[in-house]
Image (tube, coloured by chain):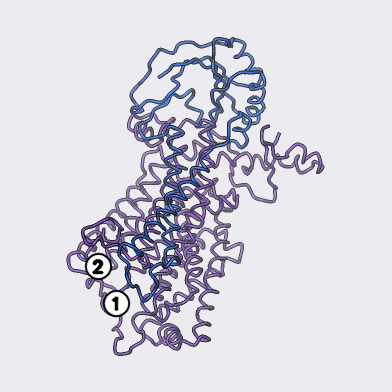
Chain colours: A blue, B purple
């Protein structure tokens, strides 16, 4: 659990946000995160985020599914209890293709969704601090981390020069915690508001 | 800077009414946040009544056996499997809209995909009832699962299409549910952030899993959606193919034909889109969402209906031709005497099927009819009736008079409990749909916002300037920028 200080700028147009992100990175500020109501194509590259490894995970889960299906079925029907089904050979691979395919898809899908939830730290009852409730509605938020070397007033005016509509300094909880949404879980009083 | 995506003005806008992002949120969340209307309560209560009748019908069958459904040699499958295939077929359109149209980059899917995916899940739940309850000894239903047991251990028959069905339907249900829910998380987060009442905040807060809208999370979300779409596409094709194998791998004349896999899949998409139309024509009117589910959406879906209906028609004629041309006289007999012959006991069902599935969708070649809501609604119901008859014809007319005349059954008639079970699944489906439309947004909120600046009508007007630019200037300014 860690309360950190952030300089938060709100944008109402993604066409303004996009070049702003690039300029902020060039100026050397560390972007904690950008919150948007919908995915913006190319924003992850602009922020310098690395590509997700979710695809690789999905592929590995799929291979697990295929091998589980083929391995188990061939063991059960050729070694453990072979049965004569209409004179067909014990090892009848064509008949096993449907189940193998289904298990491949099932393992991959379930595995990927669980991995997605784990990586993004999403689960029922998980609570995270929100910078602005409208970031799931219609505004785009950029949060810059405030280290010891950051001059907050400079950061605020820089963001405003890039087109941010509402910039302030905020103290927010960095990590997630468990709880119900209606219970107030403030760990520290947040009072600082730097006016323009 | 390549953020403004160009889309031709010839393509009609997908979102009408000059919306901005906040307006979109308001419009789509309004039905969820409003008090339930009287129409909603009436619809829900009627659905629950049907559901209760279904529960009573199923109880009768479980206590007294499948004879309650007039099932015996040789008609061992009647309404039960007809309804199973019918509901599964309906479910496939939802997956097609979400998954296949995502892969084909069709922006119009965003208006309809959330409701269609919900429809899929409810249809699969309804479909799954039939294989379970038709077992007779339902308390032994777990026998179909390959678990280590004290009977040997006795494993299941992995070579049987009936078992492939178990895996296919379970997988299809699970993957559809995951795809639907993972897409729903950002929209539920919007509802959570707008919620004022305590119970709403709690319910949507738990359901949203703590979603914040962070870019890294969106990146992963997009990757997940794309891969789930890529997985669901072959899943749709495989699940209904496996269902068709229930018939195609047998030796019954009228069932043992290799055309069944593509025939069934095309038919599934056909009936599924018809059900989507039935639901959406009403939903868009009642919830006031005509600017998001536009006439354009209805038009395009009707085009798919005429396409798949024509494929189904070709499949019927191919099947008929091969039955005549092929060497198997029993196969031809199944068509000539059990189906084409209007004087045979069940021949009438074949002709209803032919009219509803082959003739009626052809009306949608006419643009004016495609864009007419009343015609769309009645046609969609007609298509679903026709598709029900298709499964009935395949199952019952083949099996009630097959190889040996001394084994022929008397005329197959459904009982009240069979019809009750079917009506019960309608009750289950609509109960789920009413609850879904009240508590969750029926349109994919984040996805509509994603296409708003490209396909919304305000943006289309701005395309004028872009279209006047010369080619090089256009390419320079609007080349695809990966944010280097």
Percent x, y for residue A55?
A: 53, 43
Mark 1 to mark 2 CA distance (whole Å): 12 Å
Percent x, y for residue A44?
A: 59, 33
- In the image, is residue B423 above or below residue B20? below
State the image quarter where residue A92 is shown: bottom left
Q: Name the one closer to the observer, A21 or A116.
A: A116
Q: Which residue is mark 2?
A: B417
Task: Say the numbered circle drawn on residue B413.
Answer: 1
Task: Say the numbered circle drawn on residue B255.
Answer: none
State the image quarter where residue B279 is shown: bottom left
- In the image, is residue A75 above or below residue B401? above
Asked if both marks, 1 and 2, belong to the same chain, the answer given is yes
- In the image, is residue B377 above or below residue A138? below
State the image quarter where residue B247 is shown: bottom left
SS class, disc 2: helix
Percent x, y for residue A40?
A: 59, 35
SS class, disc 1: loop
Q: Is residue A84 left or right of residue A150?
A: left
Q: Contact (CB < 8 A) between labels 1 and 2?
A: no
For residue B385, say whether it is visible: no
Q: Name the one closer to the observer, B152 or B361.
A: B152
Residue at 51%, 76% (x, y): give it. B316
Residue at 58%, 57% (x, y): give it. B300
Residue most extreme to the front: A79
Chain for mark 1? B
């Amino acid at each position: 659990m860690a309360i950190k200080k952030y300089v938060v700028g709100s944008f109402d147009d993604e066409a303004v946000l996009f070049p702003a992100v690039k300029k902020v990175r060039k100026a050397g500020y560390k972007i904690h995160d950008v919150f948007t109501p919908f995915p913006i194509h190319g924003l992850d590259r602009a922020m310098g985020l690395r590509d997700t490894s979710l695809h690789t995970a999905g592929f590995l889960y799929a291979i697990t599914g295929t091998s589980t299906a083929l391995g188990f079925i061939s063991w059960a029907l050729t070694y453990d209890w072979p049965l004569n089904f209409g004179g067909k050979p014990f090892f009848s691979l064509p008949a096993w293709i449907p189940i193998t395919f289904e298990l491949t898809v099932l393992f991959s899908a379930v595995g990927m969704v669980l991995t997605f939830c784990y990586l993004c730290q999403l689960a029922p009852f998980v609570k995270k601090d929100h910078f602005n409730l409208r970031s799931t509605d219609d505004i785009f938020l950029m949060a810059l981390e405030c280290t010891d070397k950051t001059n907050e007033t400079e950061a605020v005016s820089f963001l405003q020069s890039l087109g941010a509509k509402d910039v302030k300094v905020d103290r927010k909880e960095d990590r997630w915690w468990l709880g119900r949404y209606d219970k107030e879980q403030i760990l520290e009083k947040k009072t600082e508001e730097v006016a323009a | 800077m390549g953020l403004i995506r160009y889309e031709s003005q010839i393509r009609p806008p997908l979102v009408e009414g000059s919306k901005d992002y906040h307006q979109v949120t308001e419009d789509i969340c309004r039905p969820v946040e409003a008090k339930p209307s009287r129409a909603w309560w009436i619809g829900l209560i009627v659905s629950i009544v049907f559901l209760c009748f279904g529960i009573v019908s199923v109880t009768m069958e479980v206590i007294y056996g499948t004879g309650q459904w007039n099932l015996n040699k040789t008609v061992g499958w009647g309404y039960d499997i007809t309804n199973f295939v019918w509901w599964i077929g309906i479910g496939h359109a939802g997956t097609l809209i979400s998954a296949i149209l995502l892969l084909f980059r069709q922006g119009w899917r965003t208006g309809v995909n959330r409701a269609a995916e919900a429809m899929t899940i409810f249809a699969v739940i309804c479909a799954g009832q039939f294989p379970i309850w038709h077992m007779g000894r339902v308390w032994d239903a777990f026998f179909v699962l390959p678990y280590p047991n004290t009977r040997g251990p006795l494993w299941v028959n992995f070579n049987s299409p009936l078992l492939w069905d178990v895996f296919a339907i379970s997988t299809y249900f699970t993957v559809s549910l995951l795809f639907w829910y993972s897409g729903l998380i950002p929209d539920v987060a919007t509802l959570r952030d707008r919620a004022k009442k305590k119970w709403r905040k709690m319910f949507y807060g738990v359901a949203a899993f703590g979603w914040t809208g962070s870019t890294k999370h969106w990146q992963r979300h997009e990757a997940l959606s794309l891969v789930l779409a890529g997985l669901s596409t072959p899943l749709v094709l495989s699940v209904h193919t496996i269902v068709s194998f229930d018939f195609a791998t047998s030796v019954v004349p009228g069932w043992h034909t290799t055309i069944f896999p593509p025939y069934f899949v095309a038919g599934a998409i056909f009936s599924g889109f018809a059900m989507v139309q039935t639901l959406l024509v009403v939903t868009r009117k009642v919830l006031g969402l005509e600017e998001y589910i536009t006439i354009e959406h209805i038009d395009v879906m009707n085009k798919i209906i005429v396409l798949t209906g024509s494929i189904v028609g070709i499949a019927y004629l191919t099947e008929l031709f091969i039955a005549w041309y092929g060497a198997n006289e029993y196969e031809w007999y199944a068509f000539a005497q059990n189906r084409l012959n209007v004087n045979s006991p069940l021949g009438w069902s074949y002709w209803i099927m032919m009219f509803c599935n082959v003739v009626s969708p052809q009306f949608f070649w006419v643009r004016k009819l495609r864009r007419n809501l009343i015609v769309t609604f009645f046609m969609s119901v007609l298509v679903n009736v026709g598709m029900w008859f298709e499964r009935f014809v395949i199952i019952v007319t083949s099996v009630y008079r097959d190889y040996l005349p001394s084994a022929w059954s008397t005329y197959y008639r459904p009982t009240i409990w069979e019809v009750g079970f079917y009506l019960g699944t309608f009750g289950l489906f609509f109960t789920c749909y009413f609850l879904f439309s009240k508590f969750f947004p029926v349109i994919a909120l984040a996805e509509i916002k994603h296409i708003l600046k490209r396909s919304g009508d305000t943006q289309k007007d701005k395309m004028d300037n872009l279209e006047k630019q010369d080619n090089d200037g256009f390419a320079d300014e609007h080349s695809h920028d990966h944010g280097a």
